[in-house]
Image (tube, coloured by chain):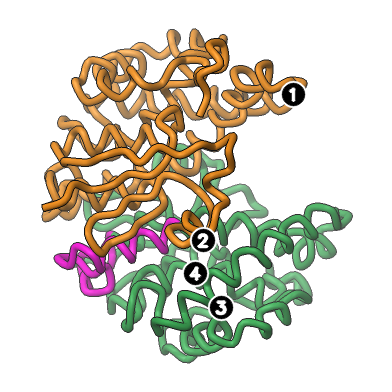
Chain colours: A green, B orange
Amino acid sequence: MAPMKLYGWVVSPWMGRVRVCLEEAGAEYEIVPMSRCGGDHRRPEHLARNPFGEIPVLEDGDVTLYQSRAIARYVLRKYKPELLKEGDLEGSAMVDMWMEVEAHHVEPTLWPIIRHCIIGPYVGRPRDQAVVDECLGKLRAVLPVYEARLSVSKYLAGDDVTTADLCHFGFMRYFMASEYAGIVDAYPHVKAWWDTLLARPSVKKVIAGMPPDFGYASGNIP
Amino acid sequence: MAPMKLYGWVVSPWMGRVRVCLEEAGAEYEIVPMSRCGGDHRRPEHLARNPFGEIPVLEDGDVTLYQSRAIARYVLRKYKPELLKEGDLEGSAMVDMWMEVEAHHVEPTLWPIIRHCIIGPYVGRPRDQAVVDECLGKLRAVLPVYEARLSVSKYLAGDDVTTADLCHFGFMRYFMASEYAGIVDAYPHVKAWWDTLLARPSVKKVIAGMPPDFGYASGNIP
């Protein structure tokens, strides 16, 4: 069977989310590299794959999928459904709930910090510290919720790693490379959880292609 | 078995999303009404249910769940899993993908329009037309994608209604009560899809508790 194809640029946090899940799943896949600077995502052939012009896109035979969390679910449902706790009504609900928490309380909080503090200086965009401070305020409200949860269970949806944990990877990876990473030190269970994720072979493999500065310093940007 | 408990105020679009799914599931549930104006969502007893202080929250025996899409999945997985296309790898991926599209391209686009154009005048908040116009621009980019999809399949994830369609209910309901609802007229398949959803008994029942102005004109606000 032909390997899955994953379209995008590997430094993307959304791409990182999906790649960690592909690695966890043990799926055979090839990356079809695209150039963001070159505008590959706005070309007709990519808009035919994803009309929103975003990456990543997964092709698996006749199936074409976009939206990183939907791709993550698909890959794990196909190859490692235990990471979705399928068949466990309460367990799968916890996976879903923490995936939604990530989607609505974590990614939208970390992404502006990453854009302003890591990417901004390289692309000559002045930092809007008010936006950064607002997001840091939100983060300081979210972290105690994670600390409380991770004080009573090793992972977000229980005692085993699930898609919910893995879906945090892409944005946490870059936030933890920012000048504000130290905020997490005040939350020892969150810190331990992140360190545990960092130790996973899937994460080690994927992070190797995601330099903390998105490749800007070396000029090796997609 | 004790009925499920759903905490919140019924005019909420998030509450509406969950209630339509509960009705579709044929689940027995009781609403535990809360007062937003009274700050019930910030009281310790509610923060114990949902540390983010948001509604709705579902209690089903020992299970306490928040995040409306996670609740929707739980309820349908328990009572009507065919609406998630569980067991159908490609079908469930389409459900997931369109749920993510709703979460990231529709709700964040419609909610500011609803806040500024419907709620704003009642709470004395000046309308920020720039924000409204920006969202209308995004909506005009999203609607053709929906039109294309609904031109080739009756519902978002295929020929049968699924959770993906139902999850659009809450925010579409209020947008379609706004002065900008007519924008949808240019997209006949989207309009027909919405009219088909409106005709469902679940939607008819739930919409009855969701006045188009959130109850502001009558002063009957939660």
Which residue corresponds to mark 4? A168
**Residue B125's disc number:** 1
Magenta portion: prevailing SS class: helix
Do the residues under discs 4 and 1 have CB atoms within 8 angstroms? no
Front of the two marks 4 and 1 = 1
Is A79 a magenta residue?
Answer: yes
At mark 2, the secondary structure is: loop
Chain ID at mark 3: A
Q: Residues within 10 Å of mark 2 (few under 14, many from 20)?
A: some
Q: Which residues are magenta?
A: A74-100
Kind of residue sitting beneath label 3: Gly
Q: Residues within 10 Å of mark 1 (few under 14, many from 20)?
A: few
Chain ID for label 1?
A: B
Residue highlighted by disc 2:
B51
- Letter of the chain that mark 2 sits on in the rendering: B
- In percent of the image, x 44 and y 67: which residue is there? A167
- As for residue A215 lying within the magenta part, the answer is no
State which mark lies toward you, 4 or 2.
2
Counting from the top left corner in percent of width and height, residue B167 is at 34, 36
Labels 2 and 1 touching (C-beta < 8 A): no
